[in-house]
Amino acid sequence: MARRYISVLLTVLLFCGCNRAEPPVDIGEKETVVLDIWCEREDWDIVTELCGNFAEEHRGKNYAFSLDVPPEDISAALSGNEEVDVLCFSSDITEQLVSEGLLLPVEDKSQRVDMSVSAASCNGTQYGFPYAADTCVLYYDRSKFTEHEVSDMNRMMSKRLEDTQYSLAMPLYEGIYQCAFFLAAGCDIPEECCSEQGVFAGEYMAALTASGRFAAELSSGDIKAGFVDGSVAAAISDIQNGEAIKSTLGSYCGVAKLPQITLSDGRSVQLGSFAVYSLTGVSSRTDNAADALLLAEWLAGAEAQRMRLSELNIAPVLTELCNDNLLLKDYPDVMVLLEQLEYSAPLLPYDQMEMLDEAAEELCDELIEGIDTRAELMDALVEFRDTCTVADNVLQ
């Protein structure tokens, strides 16, 4: 296999394996293995250090590593001429990569969050090592809401806040956020969005957008600006936007799992969320399968997850770390994210999310324009379902 060392501008080369305290070993005495790795640029420093540690731990061979940013279309690249041994990817493309025969199965000896393993598996076989989790949480201004108040959205929306335009903001036009209400109502998406449970979720969203105190169209940047000027009191967002929010609110920044809502049938239910997991896997075209599998597991191990938590504020998925309150006490938004994971569902495959986002945007527009009758709501929900399933019934 042809290896790329400096053919890409941002490629990094690491040659490791020699103990500096001992005389160097003649490279001819040991097999040399070069492993190409795809990972996001913000992860390079961590992966570089982890690769050095891996080579020190596995001194029976001389290891060299090259790092590159994953191509935009990983599936097409792996199917074409791109060569890689170990790749980092998100769980929403696991099914596609497996169906096209592009990943090797893995044997995971670690205990990880059950849903992360499910997200890395197809038909009962695991194809990646999960190392991170992400879902949305609630950030709020503690000068405007108490911890008790943000546990219930009805309570939040009924509180009158002077000089504050919006009690709550969230990008309702994005499927990953809008489906929080359908998940809370107990709907399979999109099949049951026209069911009685789906109508309950739709009624709640309609009342929310009609309240005048809910911002359904603010982007991440708009939400931060809203916290700056005081027009937003709370927002549902991902924790990658949390650093900007925390820098804005300072000591007044609070974080919590998503609130409960009360549906028109009287049930109080917890808002759900979609969760996405980051995985390491091995290309089925690798010439160094055994070494690549060892490295993929190493890059998703306990040391790696601790480093990402410490340096990037990324939630771990190893159960030993998720249950370590002493470790997590300095990462309140990560602790809340892990709590929210209990009410989450795996993010749908990428192509399905594209259709879901289109449907969510259309439904959001109708909610903002105003839905006055149950018949109008049902029509909107039918349109939502049909938009999700129009392309070869991708969600069916």
Image (cartoon, helix red, strand yellow):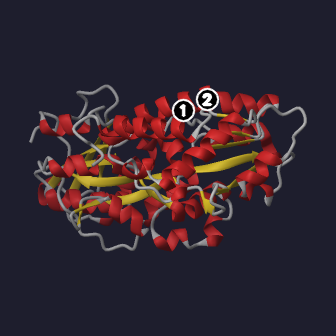
Dot 1: element: helix
Which of the pair 120/300 is nearer the observer?
Answer: 120
Judged left or right of residue 29, residue 184 is right
> Which residue is found at the position 43% from the left and 68% from the top?
113
Label 2 amino acid?
Answer: Ile
Image quarter of the N terminus: top left
Nearer the observer, 158 or 85: 158
Quarter where residue 203 is shown: top right
Which residue does the image show at 71% across and 52% down from the upper left? 153
Q: Position of residue 79 (x, y in %)?
A: 13, 38
Please tell me which residue lies in front, 23 or 336. Answer: 336
Residue 23 visible (yes or no): no
Q: Is residue 200 left or right of residue 284?
A: right
Mark 2 vs 1: CB contact within 8 A: yes
Q: Nearer the viewer, residue 114 or 389?
A: 389
Residue pictured at 32% horizontal, 25% vertical: 9
Can residue 326 be seen in the rendering of this structure?
Answer: yes
Residue 124 placement: quadrant: bottom left
Give above or below for 144 relative to 223.
Answer: below
Kind of residue sitting beneath label 1: Cys
Question: Which numbered dot is residue 109?
Answer: none
Q: Secondary structure at mark 2?
A: helix
Is residue 31 shown above or below 114? above
Single out the residue that lies furthest toward the right.
162
Dot 2 crowding, Cα within 10 Å, few <14, some 14–19, many 20+: some
Q: Which residue is mark 2?
A: 368
Q: Which residue is mark 1?
A: 364
